Amino acid sequence: MNWSFKIVRIWGIDVYMHWTFLILLGWILMSNLGAGQTLAQSLLGVGFILTLFGCVLLHEYGHALTARRYGIATKNIILLPIGGVANLEKMPDKPMQELWVALAGPAVNVLIASVLFIYFQFIGGFPDVAEFTGAITGKNFLFNVFIVNIILALFNLIPAFPMDGGRVLRALLAMRFDRGQATNIAAKIGQLLAIVFVFLGFFYNFWWVFIGLFIFLGAGAEANFESTRSALSKYKVRDALMRQFTVLHAFETIEKAITILLNGQEKEFLVELDNEIIGVITRSEIIQGLREMGQEATVGHIANRSFLQLHPDMPLQQAYEQMMRAGASICPVMEGRELIGVLNMENITEVVMLENAGLKGGNLLETATS
């Protein structure tokens, strides 16, 4: 949510807007004025963009509220100049649930378009398209909203990640294959479509090139994420536990943390006080603390006290998902009140690398050290 600010909270979900959205509105206003439109006409164009993003917001709420029915919370919704993002805690694992969550967004756009279609039939039909000048006017405002919602529904149903259609395709495939296979097939189909978009973009509209690249990268990212989840599914936290680590006392200085950082490979540390873990610090937090407070400040002042605590018998896949949602790079692993190790993202990555290298089944640590 960097560079985003909260604008409203609806149905228990915070809505944020990226600051570049304001630049978009300003650019549209100035472009309309520069094209010779009156201030009232120019403001109507800005109003159309706001209405468009209102439809995008309703689209994202379709995903969020449907996911809530299945016990999945939404952290927030962010409005960007290129669209909106509903940050769900996760997608449902059950194919039918994922299907409904993915379809809910485009369904909202279809509903809006249907309501407007009924309205136009009630007033005697669609406005005469031949009279349109390209500018947003009172006569074509709702018709343009109608067309845009149809486009939003169709565009989001492109069967490729990260579009809703990619998740619909995976959900349908997952009814026959396991989730990992379904994701790989859907990702390959998406990347094939992306290549087609890029190719056509060079001949027809260069924006298709950007859309193709967006889809290609999104499909690859989804495939990598699912591959990681699949590789971790057979392990527990204790299988990836790191037992050699440094714990800093809350009263130790940032200078000491920097010394340890420079002399070793560790980039994150636990912070303890009175034999209890009270927080964690990362390399970036150490550097920021050094810049703002100086090297004599204590690590207790810069420790992040909102951290995850894991149990050694927790499934490693579940721990990974929780760490991803929380943005946590290191977590203490506790058995009762005893600290027995830490888990960080680097260790999880190593588990995936070893698993993909052929260390199948059994205890990973025993296999790797035998």
Image (cartoon, rainbow, N blue to C red):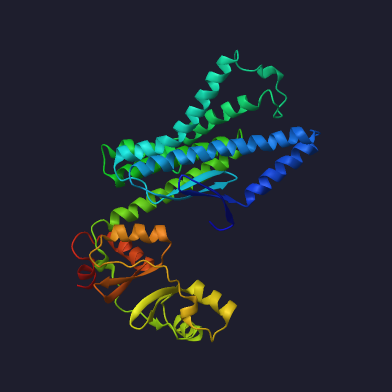
Residue at image position (53%, 38%) is: 56
Against 69, is 259 above or below? below
Residue 21 visible in the displayed image: yes
Residue at image position (46%, 75%) is: 303
Residue 221 in the image: state x and y as whole percent.
43, 51
Q: Is residue 13 left or right of residue 332?
A: right
Against 87, is 106 above or below? above
**Total marks placed:** 0
Q: Quadrant of the C terminus?
A: bottom left
Q: Residue furthest top?
A: 124
Residue 42 in the image: state x and y as whole percent.
74, 36
Residue 367 in the image: state x and y as whole percent.
20, 68
Residue 242 in the image: state x and y as whole percent.
30, 73
Q: Is residue 82 left or right of residue 193?
A: right
Q: Quadrant of residue 175?
A: top left
Residue 160 visible in the displayed image: no
Residue at image position (59%, 57%) is: 3
Please tell me which residue lies in front, 163 or 46.
46
Residue at image position (66%, 16%) is: 128
Against 351, is 166 above or below? above
Q: Quadrant of residue 369?
A: bottom left
